[in-house]
Image (cartoon, helix red, strand yellow):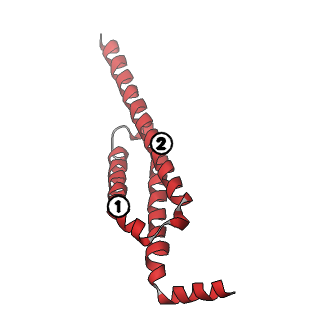
């Protein structure tokens, strides 16, 4: 009887890991799609566009990091390590492109030296 209980527990554990992997892979796909959408439209973004999504974007990143941390410290970590690494890389990509937006779309255009440099380059 003990062997049956152990086999059932192992099967349940594996089912949980497979379900978590499926969910992480789905999140990874969505993160990639969001990153690609932002990347493909980066040159058309404006400061106003960013101001409309900034708070929501920051919350998204914060929640994704929280979810990553929860999974990373869970008992299931050893079974989802590879998918979780991809998840973390996706979060890092979203953070990086968010920083790029803040720098190149929001901050730099407000800098007089930068605007003068762009003007000089455009006049060539």
Query: As displayed, is residue 26 above or below residue 87?
Result: above
Picture residue at 35% right of the left edge, 24% below the top: 12
Label 2's element? helix
Seen in the picture, residue 104 relative to 61 is either above or below; the reply is: below
Is 50 or 85 nearer to us in this picture?
50
Residue 52 in percent (x, y) is at 35, 64
How many residues crowd around disc 2 within 10 Å: few (fewer than 14), some, or many (20 or more)?
some
Residue 85 in view here: no
Sequence-first disc among 1 and 2? 1
Q: Which residue is mark 1?
A: 58
Residue 14 seen in the figure: yes
Which residue in the rendered view is the most extreme toward the top?
1
Residue at figure coordinates x 66%, y 87% from the top left:
123
* Of the two numbered discs 1 and 2 in the rendering, the one whose residue sits closer to the viewer: 1
Distance from disc 1 to disc 2, alpha carbons, whole Å, reads: 23 Å
Point out residue 1 in the picture as x, y percentages from the top left corner. 30, 10
Q: Which residue matches tag 2?
A: 83
Quadrant occupied by the C terminus: bottom right
**Front position in the image: 14 or 108:** 108
Circle 1 residues within 10 Å: few <14, some 14–19, many ≥20: some
């Amino acid at each position: 009887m003990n062997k049956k209980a152990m086999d059932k527990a192992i099967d349940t554990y594996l089912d949980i890991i497979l379900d978590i992997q499926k969910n992480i892979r789905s999140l990874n796909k969505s993160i990639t799609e969001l990153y690609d959408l932002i990347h493909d439209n980066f040159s058309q973004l404006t400061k106003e566009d960013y101001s409309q999504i900034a708070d929501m974007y920051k919350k998204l990143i914060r929640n994704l990091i929280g979810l990553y941390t929860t999974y990373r410290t869970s008992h299931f970590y050893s079974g989802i390590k590879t998918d979780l690494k991809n998840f973390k890389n996706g979060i890092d990509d979203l953070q990086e492109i968010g920083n790029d937006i803040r720098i190149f779309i929001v901050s730099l255009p407000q800098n007089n030296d930068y605007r003068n440099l762009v003007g000089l380059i455009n006049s060539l």
